[in-house]
Amino acid sequence: MDLQKFGVKLFFNTNGSYSSKDFVPVFHNWIQNKVIDDHLLIDVTDYSHIPDGPGVMLIAHEGNFSLDQESQQPGIMYMRKTEIAGSFTERFSTVLSTVIKVANRLNDNNISKQVDFIPNSFRFIANDRLYAENTADNQDFYKREIQKALDGKYSDSQFEFGDVSDENERLAFTVNFSNDIDILEGK
């Protein structure tokens, strides 16, 4: 339950026109204008040349934001690096809210590029094998904890867990809402 290093990825609809390099100036602008609350934004790095890699990353003291390309599923991912107070459910809610705010800001950019998000799905990724070894028991535990957080925020919605990571990978799974929810709008 002490897991602090974890992330959430919101997926893009792939339409062939997406290029993470297009957003390098956007991320630089975010650093200059300090646009992400409670984050010390530091640098932008371009890993877009790495297949299945992190794409373009916005490095912050508290966590990294990336236009992730893993498994040929592009999206915006926020991976928390520093501690957050509260229970795991509260920490998860904070990380989810942060990535949703960043996703909405990503579409509100000065380069006239729109990103088409899949509005009813996200991926949870644990980034600390000490506190979240990828076992069936841990998968079940974190699914229950995330369900508690989502029940509080999206009480009228139903969702299922899928795309569970293999045992040699980091603990991860995808959450798919079964109705017309748009988590970017909080509906």
Image: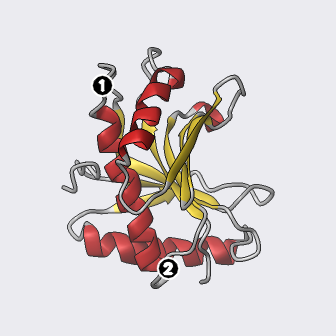
On residue 165, the disc is none
Q: Residue at x 57, y 78 (%)?
A: 141
Q: Residue 178, image x and y in percent?
A: 32, 53
For the C terminus, give its image quadrant. bottom left
Q: How many marks?
A: 2
Q: Nearer the viewer, residue 165 or 9?
A: 9
Horizontally, is 99 left or right of 141 in the view? left
Q: Residue furthest top?
A: 17
Q: Nearer the viewer, residue 4 or 41?
A: 41
Task: Note whether residue 124 is visible.
Answer: no
Q: Residue at x 59, y 84 (%)?
A: 1
On residue 110, the disc is 1
Kind of residue indicated by mark 1:
Asn
SS of the residue under disc 2:
helix
Q: CA distance from mark 2 to mark 1?
A: 36 Å
Task: Note whether residue 42 is visible.
Answer: yes
On residue 88, the disc is 2
Q: Residue 78, image x and y in percent?
A: 51, 52
Q: Residue at x 60, y 33 (%)?
A: 69
Residue 160: quadrant of the picture? bottom left
Q: Dot 2, crowdedness within 10 Å: few (<14), some or many (≥20)?
A: some
Looking at the image, tell me whether mark 2 or mark 1 is earlier in sequence order. Answer: 2
Q: Residue at x 38, y 48 (%)?
A: 34
